[in-house]
Image (spheres, rainbow, N blue to C red):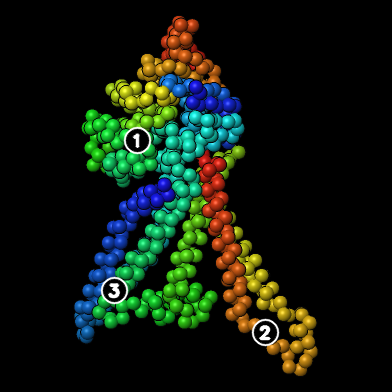
Amino acid sequence: MLGKLFLYDMKNQLRIWRFAYIGILGFSLLTALIRCLDFKKGVLGEIWGAVYGVSKGFFYAAGAVMIFATLFYAVLYFRNNLLKDQGYLMHTLPVKESELFLSKFLSSWCCILLSILVFAAGIVITRFGTGDLFSIIYTENGVAKRISLSMLFFGEGYETPRLLFLVIFFAIPVNLSLFLFSLTLGYTMKQSKRRMNRDVLSVLVYIGTYAGQQFLGVISLILGALLYFRHYGTKSFMEQILSEQGPTAQLPMDYFITVAVGIDGILIIGLAVAAVFWSIYRLKKYLNLE
Amino acid sequence: MELVKCDGLIKNYGLKKALSGVTFSLPAGKITGLLGPNGSGKTTLIKILGGLLTADGGTVAIGGNSPGVETKKIVSYLPERTYFSSAVKVKETLDFFEAFYEDFELERAEEMLKSLQISDKSKISELSKGNREKLQLVLVMSRRAKLYLLDEPMGGVDPAARDFILRTILKNYAEDASVVISTHLIQDVEKVLDDVIFLKEGNICLKQSVDELREKEKKSVDALFREVFQC
């Protein structure tokens, strides 16, 4: 049944994105065409260069908007399909709540990946005629170098594929699971006294989970610091201090960052997995389609 | 044999009590009218039976099981609202039911849609409100279910459509299946009901067979309803 549900959800979500994909690919083709027709010199060349710049800028902006819109629509689709009127159809199907949740989760994930892939294909198309089609995708001089986040954590030379790996297998599923969890909890939470709008409640839950993520970040930093500074104050460290040579076994600062980020990553993955299980449990035990 | 058994069902919405200890059982092969004024708990009760609401207290058993995957296989539920996305086509709704319900009879559904002159190529957004409701009824009644839960199937439709709805229900439910119809349009459904349950402020105030009721009270269900629930 999960397969059937997945196909149904994919079909429903792609119903609107297929036009966006065609639009993005078409626009990238147009950008490539403008580049290929570039007039090398003179006023016309300058104007044409500006047209190309605008076209390229618009393409990148449209691609980024499409990816974020896919995520936003996935959350909206989950809300409408499971927690609002369409939920009357979905929750009366002879399928488990875990299958309903997972099909939404997996199809949303796949749609976001598809949007990234289409955007990447568009980037490749825009580079037709440069003799350098794929470098922006996979080399260290490509997209990743322009993203400060990657440099903050991994330093110069960090390659795009690794960044994409992190985005695809960490950032997207983690955030998706927390968004869906917030909605599920917001819509299944029992309200004993004052009844609050369920969407507002979901936003409040999300703020709570975001604060939880930050709290895990702080814990990770503390744990990373404990591991980094574990030599300080030990007998061997004191002996090194007392000797004229000074301490020699210090770990590089990168080690601290790697450990802290690693711990944070593991804790956040744990939080996301717990969010998925809790969401399924809430749908099973506390579903309230009012 | 009892198909549905509810014992001490409680449901609250905030401070408001929707159901306060509802206990009843339904046999197989009967059409039961769940009658009561607005806000009496009819929809809440049907949603609990359909597995869309979780009761705060008490137990429910349908065919011996608590609401879940097994009960959803034998329950065909018609909500009071339309649940299809307006972007889908009628054909897709048929395919959807065929894919997920083993007891769905596609030919029967297509036949009914044909008689209603609803094209399977139409989009839901192109159908009138009445036709959307009829489409849902056709899909629900094209299942060979053991229990049909119909929540206000005639709410907001014209008298001619009501006749169609009643005919569709009577023509399509299997004899060993039970039908629960929640409504406050009693005059229209009275002639097809075997039993009635009167719900008042979340409590059952009457559960009786229609024949017994007519014999004992010497009045129609509609007349009795007006008497019990007069403002």
The disc at residue B104 is 1
Q: Which residue is mark 2?
A: A250
How would you rate the neighbour count of disc 2 (Cα within 10 Å): few for under 14, some for 14-19, many for 20 or more? few
Depth order, front residue of B180/B26: B26
Q: Which residue is mark 3?
A: A126
Residue drawn where x is 52% and y is 16% of the image: B206
Q: Which residue type carries mark 3?
A: Thr
The one of A205 and B52 positioned closer to us in this rendering? B52
| Disc 1: CA contacts within 10 A as few (<14), some (14-19) or many (>=20) | many
Question: Is residue A38 among the parts visible in the rendering?
Answer: yes
The answer to the question of whether label 1 and label 2 lie on touching residues, with beta carbons closer than 8 A, is no
Please, what is the three-letter code of the amino acid marked with disc 2?
Answer: Gln
Q: Are marks 3 and 2 on the same chain?
A: yes
**Measured along the vertical axis of the image, is residue A155 above or below residue A177?**
below
Note whether A99 is above or below B46 in the view shown: below
Q: Nearer the viewer, mark 3 or mark 1?
A: 1
Give the CA separation, mark 3 to mark 1.
50 Å
Give me the residue at 43% from left, 36% from top.
Answer: B73
What numbered label is drawn on residue A196? none
The quarter holding residue B173 reads: top left
Secondary structure, mark 3, is helix
Mark 1 and mark 2: span between their CA atoms? 71 Å
In the image, residue B108 above or below residue B96: above
Q: Earlier in the sequence, mark 3 or mark 2?
A: 3
| Residue type at tag 1 | Phe
Q: Residue at x 58, y 71 (%)?
A: A261
Residue A159 screen position, x and y as percent? 44, 78
The chain carrying label 1 is B
Q: Does mark 2 fall on the same chain as mark 1? A: no
Q: Position of residue B6 (x, y in %)?
A: 55, 27
